[in-house]
Amino acid sequence: MSFEPDLRVEIAGIRFPTPLIAASGTFGYGTEYLDVADYRAIGGIVVKGLYMEPREGCAPPRIWETPSGMLNAIGLQEIGVERFVSDKMPRLRELGVNILVNICGSTIEEYGDLARILDDVEGVCGIELNISCPNVHEGGILFGCDPDMAARVTERVRQNTRLPVIPKLTPIVTDITDIARKVEAAGADALSLINTIPAMAIDVETRKPRLANVVGGLSGPAIRPIAIRLVYQAAQAVDVPIIGIGGISGHEDALEFFLAGASAVQIGTMSFVDPSVWRKTLDGLEDYCRRHRVDRLSALKGSLVADVKAVPTGW
């Protein structure tokens, strides 16, 4: 008799057919990969971050590949919420994939206004709060570094929508458990972590920075151990589900996040390198569950075997 593990997960009332979600900023508006990726392996898509109005983003060059990951300073170039709803959502609804919208704001009020607009849009099943982008000069990481400010953004959005609210946290904080608890208390239904880590690279011949913005956000394999540590610590501090993000390139990477306490994971940078990462990762998870006789993937959540729990703010 064949053994078929159940890889479905449920987060904040959203039922994901697989635990793999496309990370915001790495999957466009959700349709750009139709010719190269297996969408049946993707449980959800978090579309590019949206403001109320269109933005041109940072000047080029905006991407630089480092030996251990990608450095980017796109600066949240986007089309504005109105065009997203009118031009992108009709096609996204046809895909049959859970659509979550990442929202950004220069003010707390802008986050609230965006949530109110998206609340009535058919096909949007959740809102991710971008309070952690390192490449914008207002809002973004400035909200995410301050636990009280992050809580105020979360609370405003919570008041303006019935949709699940998922703050995306920055790793640039002294104590991830403090901010995790505060946004949970403010009404967060789940947490996404982590966003990219501020970093830079320099051309030694010209002595100029590789990015026009000078500093960008580092993603990819280099940040994975940092992300796993933060997911582990946050999972011990809150009751809401956590979506792990950071340098996932296959099923073993994803499993690390599940064992640390994540309920699902987002894949970002690797989808640029290998669009087949979705199918390969899902197949790898299925094989792992069969070999270990795990009937439900959700049973692995937080099942790390450790003799001593980590001290939340040190070691």
Image (cartoon, grey):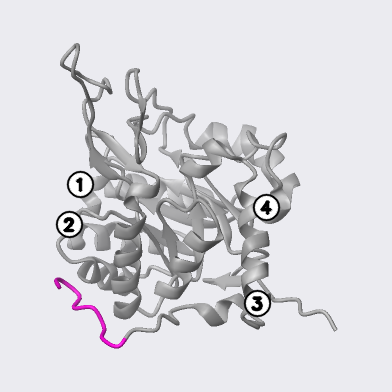
Q: Where does the magenta region start and end? A: 307-315
Looking at the image, is mark 3 or mark 1 earlier in the sequence? Answer: 1
Measured along the vertical axis of the image, is residue 173 above or below residue 56?
Answer: below
Of callouts 3 and 4, the N-terminal one: 4
Mark 1 lies on residue: 142
Q: Quadrant of residue 310?
A: bottom left
The residue most toward the right is 1
Residue named by callout 4: 279
Residue 123 seen in the figure: no
- Kindly identify which residue carries mark 3: 291
**Disc 3 to disc 1: CB gap under 8 Å:** no
Element at label 2: loop
Give the residue number, with chain letter if any, for mark 2: 146
Inspect the image, locate mark 2, and give the three-letter code of the amino acid beneath it.
Asp
| Residue 218 can be seen, yes or no | yes
Q: Is residue 151 left or right of residue 280?
A: left
Inter-mark Cα distance, 4 to 1: 36 Å
Q: Give the residue drawn at x 18%, y 66%.
A: 175
Q: Position of residue 20 (x, y in %)?
A: 58, 58
Please say whether residue 309 is one of the residues in the magenta stretch. yes
Percent across and percent down for residue 217 are 30, 39
Q: Amino acid at mark 3?
A: Arg
**Distance between mark 4 and mark 2 Cα atoms:** 38 Å
**Residue type, mark 1 in image:** Leu
Viewer-side label of 3, 1: 3
Q: Residues within 10 Å of mark 3 (few under 14, many from 20)?
A: few
Q: Quadrant of residue 244?
A: bottom left
In the visual, does 53 lie left or right of 206?
Answer: right
